[in-house]
Amino acid sequence: MEHYTMNLTLKVWRQKNKNDRGGFITYKVKDISSEMSFLEMFDVLNERLIEESEEPIAFDHDCREGICGMCSMYINGRPHGPWEGTTTCQLHMRAFKDGDTIVVEPWRANSFPVIKDLIVDRTSFDRIIQAGGFISVNTGNAVDGNSIPIEKAKADDSFAAAACIGCGACVAACKNSSAMLFVSAKVSHLALLPQGEPEKKTRVLNMIAQMDKEGFGGCTNTGACEAVCPKEISLDNIARLNQEFIGASVKTGK
Amino acid sequence: MLNSKIPAGPLENKWKNYKATCKLVNPANKRKMEIIVVGTGLAGASAAASLGELGYKVKAYCFQDSPRRAHSIAAQGGINAAKNYQNDGDSVFRLFYDTIKGGDYRSREGNVYRLAEVSASIIDQCVAQGVPFAREYGGLLSNRSFGGTQVQRTFYAAGQTGQQLLIGAYQALERQVALGNVTMYSRHEMLDLVTIDGKARGIICRNLITGELERHFGHAVLLCSGGYGNVFYLSTNAMGCNVTAAWKAHKKGAYFGNPCFTQIHPTCIPVTGDHQSKLTLMSESLRNDGRIWVPKKQGDSRKAKDIPEDERDYYLERRYPAFGNLVPRDVASRAAKERCDAGYGVGSSRQAVFLDYAAAIERYGKIEAGKQAMDHADHDTIVKMGKDVVKEKYGNLFDMYEKITGENPYEVPMRIYPAVHYTMGGLWVNYELMTNIPGLYCLGEANFSDHGANRLGASALMQGLADGYFVIPYTIGNYLADEIRTAAIPTDHPAFAETENKVKDRINSLMNIKGNRSVESFHKRLGKIMWDKCGMARNAQGLKEAVEEIRALKNEFWSDVKIPGGINELNPELDKANRVADFIELGELMCLDALDRNESCGGHFREEFQTEEGEALRQDDKYMFVSAWEYKGDNKWDLHKEELNYEVVKPSQRSYK
Amino acid sequence: MSVRALFLCPNLQISSTTMTWKHIFTSSIGKKLVMGLSGLFLITFLIIHAGVNACIWAFDHGEMFNKAAHFMGSTVVVRIIEIGLFAGFFVHIIQGYVLEVQNRSTRKIGYEVKMGNKGSKWYSRSMGLLGTLILLFLILHIYHFWTPSRLGGLWNIKPLQPVSYEGGKEIHNLYAEMIAVFSDNLLVVVIYILGCISLAFHLLHGFQSAFRTLGLHNQKFVPLVKGTGAAFAIIVSVVFALMPISIYLKWVD
Ligand SMILES: Cc1cc2nc3c(=O)[nH]c(=O)nc-3n(C[C@H](O)[C@H](O)[C@H](O)COP(=O)(O)OP(=O)(O)OC[C@H]3O[C@@H](n4cnc5c(N)ncnc54)[C@H](O)[C@@H]3O)c2cc1C
Ligand code: SF4
Ligand code: FES
């Protein structure tokens, strides 16, 4: 792989706190190596800002391995930037070239209010899980793991849905700010397993009710969420969610 | 003398007897008992959920925005359990034995046996929660092998085992939050421990959004705050991993056990330059199928594919024929370092070795061809089929490698180098996981743990969940049963006020330094000292220098650090400064501990103590103990020793040949 | 579950017993279910309508077409279905607008750089706009044909001319009306064609989306439905568009 360095113009959303109006500030960065990760490029900029006695740009990140779901930047009109199936932290600078202008914004949705700069509040996702995204089994009650055989294909599908990292890119990408891909990933993960069967109905009804209460929009099947999801969670999960919801509604409605 | 409170009796009965005789708290009283759980990784989330289920009033804390993001999420390879589903001779005893041996005979028999005993229940519990472990076509659970063992006992979910286990624990936790049994405080960082009459009674934490300091009371406090590998700046740990919670407890009197025992993982993506902010692990499971090699010629700069087979040195297979590429981590890491130091390294930095999948791809391809009765498949077809198999097994790891390096590991061998990965050291705890401060417990990677001087792969997840799901629910009752008469202490108690003031003062003094250097620059310098002098190989001379350098660095930090922003707002630089200040102090203790331990064992390799073949040389007669350090004020520590008694296993020189 | 837990966590209150129809249809999925079902209902209507339209290519001076059209208005059953049809339109339109407004309000502050077509098709994001165009077209269309054929003679509405075949009963000569409307009015023809194009894109997304909303996720059927949807969207719209074109260009007389 050939390495190169580049000079870039960054336009970054800065907002002091929740109540501040915020706006874009432009920065020039020099000698960025193509081997850096996108966040390392931000580290370089932040170090410079500190040197210049300015406040560094606040952004969420932790694992920098694409798995914790903390990083969340909307880069040049796409959540997590230009690479498919990639989180912001795994995006590397070889995706850009010398002279590029990069616009960086926070996730935008009423249900994800900005806390500071590029950091948003995603606790609504936790509350959706609280509404039913679990299997009610207390510690110590379990039977032997192999006493519940599960068809491999189903286990694999369940795993693929469970791979969701709760980053919220799906919401950020959706024109309706719908959290349906996130919710469907959890509903599918659990509904596909026999262990999830007993609570199947209440789970989906309660999770959807909570999602609505949090102010996320409805799904219109545009597929933007699937396209930007770093874990490539399939749109099929949303269809499965619909099916689960309809089934549960019909069977439990008065 | 330290009392580890290991129950008497034969190894197999210790835990059984303990459970049968420990004190219990009745349900009505449980409702009145408040428990603080700092950290919601595997250890913390499982503990908080289980204690909530039991009816305790739990308060849980994490510095991320959600408990689901704890560093445990990043664990890739798998979790061990003595299930013997593969019929390959595994048993509780064998898992126990492997762990003791893997830890180079520096862990407690009683604890490790208990760990092996409860390991099977962990898998059952996780399956019941809906953790989608990998399965065979028959619908049963699948296993893979990991370093340091000769059986297949590792359960996994592709390369995302930690994620799936944590999501399971997180969901159990959120369920308890919904039921009102657990109150979750995310984006909160514990900055000090409150003790009253010698007992742990609460914490002071900072609301990371508003900057406000908060006081929280608990009848007991559980620290599940993870490992401190980030003291090296570069490590495979998440950026936020820190020692602060444990360190604050240490300064309040909790002993720090074996601080110098650090695990360097052999297979990580090498450093590319000064901008490097963290290192990425390539799961140990890759050593199952990958072969590690360097050129036989020094300074060979040919491309891997241009180096013929007979000019390659598969040095692990050569040196350790019995375990080959699956030797334990410490052994594999040192072997890589040895080759690179001797001038055989590859890549532009020469600080890397090859991890090659060509042979595995061909082998799997042939098996596939066999399965499909394609006896005369040509080479390309075989390779293609082999790649598909490898993709199914390790696809996400290969993708990750490609994203970071821009190289396609299906085509060219990966370049890897050891990196700091795990800390076996941590707060000293007894059999009940209680530190020497009554009511203060420590679980998961944060305690000095069951792994001795080296942890075997897939055992950290096991330990974290064992601690949280199956140990603490019993042992905490034994303490709280005597606390039922203690009413909740109001947080205007002078001890809370005093501790909060101290925290406030420290934050103020940090902010008022207004120096010239960023927190990051100090962290980098600390990391370099630690890596160079207290890393994969250590010697007395270097360690002494390191202690001096760290002390100087500490002075410089406290006079020249520059923290922009304010106190009463979200301020990541201030958070980092708090953590780095603690890392600096810890670094000093680690070097002192390494200096004190005149032997090589597990991850602690003192160059003065090695066999002629370069293997670690223990000094069992002198160092068969846990070093538990007591803080005695700036730069001063007292050493307490906990003797290790081996009643069942006979320590011998570890051999993987 | 304890009372306290219920109190602390109101979201757990929707247990299986309180899930009423209202809950179902006011939830986000329920709302799109309404869109999907009404949409599918309208799709069945399109099939019939396109079938009737196709009768003009019998080249019999509109006899078959007029008979078919007459049948569509003659029996009580069909009349009742027609009411259902209006209800379907009504629900689809109202719910569509409600959803559009609600969904748009979920992001008060928008992006500087829009996502645009990165990840989704423009028409899937423009169902409201396309629907509106179709609605405008629909109003014109109703004014042109439905009004005179159903309400002709009432108030001041000009009735359609009568025609009778083989001495049978007199029926409306809708065909003649069509010739009159389209023969030399280019503007109307163009509006009709634009309406049909809007319909095509609306269906291109709507058809498969309706099935998805109903829960279709089987990998064998999803491509099938997508393919059918695309074919349907194109065929139906082309059939509709060809009618004014055929008349304007005098392919039929
Ligand atoms: C890349 C990688 C791969 C790994 N793979 C494996 C594997 O395959 N198998 C295996 O067995 N092990 C593996 N490990 C090791 C294992 O993941 C960890 O040891 C284990 O997950 C630690 O869990 P924990 O619960 O103790 O701590 P963590 O998961 O680190 O959680 C710490 C928690 O404490 C909180 N916290 C910390 N400080 C504070 C504070 N001051 N105030 C409030 N909250 C605080 C954090 O927010 C977090 O919630 C791997 C480790 C790494 C780095
Ligand atoms: S579904 Fe994908 S985009 Fe949405 S939260 Fe999960 S991982 Fe992120
Ligand atoms: S920082 Fe964890 S996913 Fe990006």
Image: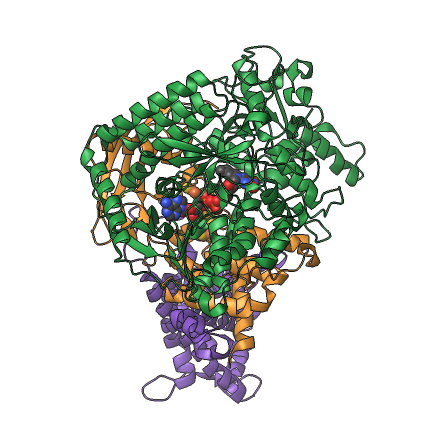
Q: Is residue B81 left or right of residue B70?
A: right
**Colouring of the image:** by chain
Question: Where on the image, by quarter, is ligand 3?
Answer: top left
What is the quadrant of the C terminus of chain B in the image? top right
Task: Please say if B38 is above or below B21.
Answer: above
Residue at the top extreme, as displayed: B298
Q: Observer-nearest residue: C7 or C139? A: C7
The chain displayed purple equals C
Whole-percent x, y for residue B552 in the image = 29, 23
For the point 70% across and 58% down, which residue is it? A147
Q: Is residue C75 visible?
A: no
Residue B370's quadrant in the figure?
top right
Task: Please say if B297 is above or below B34.
Answer: above
The chain displayed orange equals A
Q: Is residue B193 visible?
A: yes
Whole-percent x, y for residue B514 in the image = 19, 33
Whole-percent x, y for residue C13 in the image = 44, 74
Number of marks present in the image shown: 0
The chain displayed green equals B
For the point 45% across and 60% down, which residue is it? B482
Q: Is residue A7 left or right of residue B361?
A: left
Q: Is residue B404 left or right of residue B295?
A: left
